[in-house]
Amino acid sequence: MSEFRVGLIGYGTAGAYFHAPLVHATPGLRLSAVVTRNPERQAEVAHRYGAAGVADVRELWEHSDLVVVASPNRTHVSMAAAALAEGLPVVVDKPVARTAEEARELVRLAEEAGVMLTVFQNRRWDGDFLTVRRLVAEGRLGDVLRYESRFERWRPVPKGGWRETGGAEEIGGLLYDLGTHLVDQALQLFGPAHEVYCESDVRREGVASDDDTFIALRHAGGVRSHLWASSVAARLGPRMRVLGSAGAYVKHGMDVQEERLRAGLTPGSPGFGADEESRWGQLGTDDDTRPVPTEPGAYLDFYRGVERALREGAPPPVDPRGAIDTLAVIEAARLSADQRVVVRLG
């Protein structure tokens, strides 16, 4: 097969700004059909990608060798299960499900069908995360004591939409949105979490789901992760601060790839994921610090990995079992916030 046909379910923010351009830029993949009932969006996908706009997922199966689920969170499990039942490999945007048990069931369905299932944890290919992973692996921080990570915004007036106005049934709020990335990155860097503590609040009028959340993890190896997701941060903290026995790494500013995707830049173009020198993080101590070039961000590597998995039988770029572990922590965080307790795992 020269190209794998990709059917995309959903053309909102995730579908339009992330999945569609990344699929389009990946050799061996071709965006063939997009599920959207909006006539303007149907015209857009036809013009930009030569893809068919279809109104119902049942029209998608015949156009697809791979299905990407980028619909609202509450539909992720049902859409993924339907595609797996058709014998089609699936990419699911995060969060893959509401609970770890639901994610475990999807993994079982994929195994029974003998097809690939993977989760779009694209922040594993953020430049700042890749830089921290390299510094930790090289031992340049010594023993890591505490890892701090933030996705903060100043958005005092809600934008609206299901992520903010929907209740628990919509799987909205920052804990399931940005919190999924924060937890996933922490687990990737420092392994399983044994203790979870969370403070989660709704700060803005008209918002139904959490918009200001803090999570503290104690990892099995002793590292503590402190994670923030907020829409009401009038002054932004460091994107990452990693404190070690030999020094610290501090990085400000978000990864550049989302901004460039939203601006319509081509993700396969040279320098797409490169950080400007003025945004590089600093490594060292108060007495001696130096800039560290940020590793190039590489969202396109996710879909390159998907293509290899389909063509060569390679492991998927994100093992869905890791998403189960992340959701177990998210569930523990919800329980901790509700009951104001430390939740122990494992």
Image (spheres, helix red, strand yellow):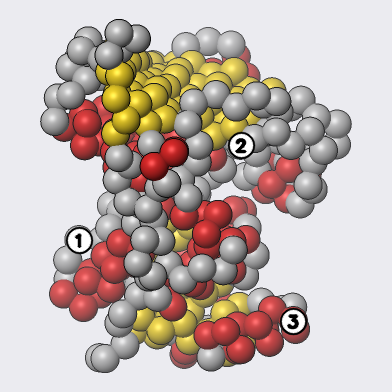
Q: Is residue 126 above or below residue 306?
A: above
Q: Which residue is mark 1?
A: 315
How far is mark 3 from mark 2, CA to CA?
29 Å
Q: Which residue is mark 2?
A: 174
Rendering coords of residue 117 (x, y %): 34, 62
Q: Please give the label number shown on residue 184.
A: none
Return the residue nearer the eye: 66 or 103.
Answer: 66
Please give the name of the residue rendered at 46% of the width and 82% of the height, measured from the top-left corner.
31
Left or right of residue 329, residue 303 in this image: left
Rendering coords of residue 147 (x, y %): 36, 21
Rendering coords of residue 252 (x, y %): 47, 31
Q: Amino acid at mark 2?
A: Leu
Q: Considering only order in the chain, which callout, 2 or 1, is on the residue closer to the N terminus?
A: 2
Q: Considering only order in the chain, which callout, 2 or 3, is on the residue closer to the N terminus?
A: 3
Per the image, label 1 sits on a secondary structure element best described as loop
Per the image, label 3 sits on a secondary structure element best described as helix
Rendering coords of residue 315 (x, y %): 20, 61
Return the residue nearer the eye: 159 or 119.
Answer: 159
Q: Is residue 79 above or below residue 150?
A: below
Q: Could you tell me which quadrant the C terminus lies in?
A: top left
